[in-house]
Image (tube, helix red, strand yellow):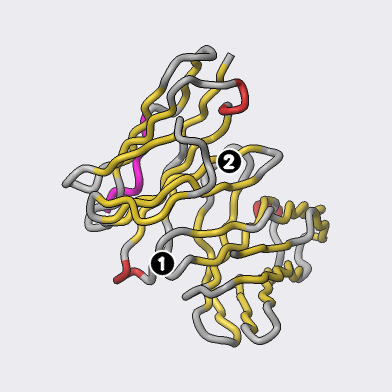
Amino acid sequence: GQNIDQPTEMTATEGAIVQINCTYQTSGFNGLFWYQQHAGEAPTFLSYNVLDGLEEKGRFSSFLSRSKGYSYLLLKELQMKDSASYLCATDNYGQNFVFGPGTRLSVLP
Amino acid sequence: KAGVTQTPRYLIKTRGQQVTLSCSPISGHRSVSWYQQTPGQGLQFLFEYFSETQRNKGNFPGRFSGRQFSNSRSEMNVSTLELGDSALYLCASSSPEGGNIQYFGAGTRLSVL
């Protein structure tokens, strides 16, 4: 099975950098994915990792270490609009996703 | 390319009724997954269909069922509604060629009174 943990809430300041961690215990997956979800809206895809290491996409980067069962999402140059929930998920070899509980990020001015 | 479309956006039902939700995936996507999202439980996987076959099922009672048509559109049915079924129901589509990234529709918000 798959069990994913994330911090429940985080707070950061506009313009800062924040790292959201995700730890998992899983029997196997192809990729680890990160989604952003604003209140009342659907999740939107941000980034994913298949191989260990860092994937950079503009202000967002994601890191994966399979040996440590660990991933993080790095958000740089935080903006107020980045206030949202961030969901970590593993795929079941491409069949369905298992989502973590999500981390609610509040960006303060 | 049009995104994932879910209808209806909002539904109000009473206990004991049944409901059918619809999902049209992104053109070319043959995999459709359904999730239930509640404040207490987060995003929970219901089932996944690929080419009209259910490939995987989550831990939900048999009152929750689904199907997929030859054009990849999918429907989800919940029978004998309970108060606890009130939730946001999300549909996502994906393709192996696209790295199996799941793209979500806006969801159907179901309220059971």
Quadrant location of the C terminus of chain B? Answer: top right
**Left-right relation of B70 to A88:** left
Q: Residues within 10 Å of mark 2 (few under 14, many from 20)?
A: some
Check the image and report above or below for A42 versus A36: above
Q: Which residues are magenta?
A: B1-7
> What residue occupies the far front of the structure in this picture?
B62
Q: Is residue B80 magenta?
A: no
Residue found at x 39% / y 36%:
B65
- Looking at the image, do the residues carrying marks 1 and 2 touch, with CB atoms under 8 Å apart? no
Check disc 1 and report the residue beneath it.
A94
Residue placed most toward the observer, B57 or B2: B57
Q: Secondary structure at mark 1?
A: loop
Amino acid type of disc 1? Gly
Residue placed most toward the observer, A90 or B64: B64
Check the image and report above or below for A84 versus B63: below
| Chain that bears disc 1 | A
Residue B95: % across, % down: 31, 63
| Chain that bears disc 2 | B
> What residue occupies the far left of the structure in this picture?
B70
Residue found at x 63% / y 37%:
B38
Residue found at x 59% / y 57%:
A99
Residue A79: % across, % down: 69, 58
Residue placed most toward the observer, A73 or B35: B35
Amino acid type of disc 2? Gln
- The image quadrant of residue B20 is top left
Mark carried by residue B37: 2
Marks 1/2: CA distance? 20 Å
Residue A68: % across, % down: 70, 83
